[in-house]
Amino acid sequence: MKVILTKDVEGLGNFGDTLEVKDGYARNWLIPQGFACTFSSRNVRIYEEMCKVNQRKTERNKVKAEAVKSRVESLSITIPMEAGQDDKLFGSVTSGMISEALKKEGFKIDHKSIILDEPVKELGVYTIKIRLHPDVYSNLKVWVVSKEEI
């Protein structure tokens, strides 16, 4: 059966791909779950319209992300942590902690969008990468200080 994917399906294809799959797989899984629709001239026209709408929405979100990027890059946040000898932290700074600190500054950024290359386990200044949009990344300066210094 020939189908058009309406969502990305891991191991199968991406949104908009036209595929030939087994009839049972299409009827029992892909179509009922909303991952695909049958291939027809009507569905092709619907898919093309969905692509146009999706592209306009993506462009609007990218413009908004660019505006947020400049504001985030001018920002510097401080996270107080318990520290022992040699500036080692008791625990580590997580993406959730950074997300909460950003929320206090007025930014609603999901912790899954914060990219920590390695765990932050020492006091210091770190540059953290944040994914605001699939094409837009921002760098945030994070100061990790001892609670005793505050």
Image (cartoon, grey):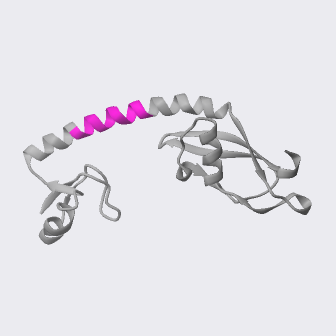
| Boundaries of the magenta span | 50-61
In percent of the image, x 60 and y 29: which residue is there?
A: 70
Which x, y percent locates residue 140? 67, 40
Q: Position of residue 15 (x, y in %)?
A: 29, 50
Please state, as top left, top right, bottom left or bottom right, where the C terminus lies in the image. top right
Q: Which residue reaches farthest left?
A: 41
Taking the magenta stretch, the answer to whether it contains residue 104 is no
Identify the residue shown where x is 87% and y is 62%: 84
In percent of the image, x 20 and y 56: which residue is there?
36
In this rendering, position of residue 21 left or right of residue 85:
left
Comparing 59 with 71, the one in front is 71
Does residue 148 appear to the left or right of 100 in the view shown?
right
Residue 54 painted magenta: yes
Q: Main secondary structure of the magenta part?
A: helix
Total tally of numbered discs in the picture? 0
In this rendering, is residue 73 above or below 37? Answer: above
Q: Quadrant of residue 42?
A: top left
Instruction: Residue 47: give x, y in percent of width and height.
Output: 19, 43
Quarter of the figure with the N terminus:
bottom left
Residue 61: x and y in percent read 42, 34
Corner quadrant of residue 33: bottom left
* Residue situated in front as seen by the camera: 126 or 26: 126
Between 100 and 131, the one nearer to me in the picture: 100
Residue 101, above or below 14: above
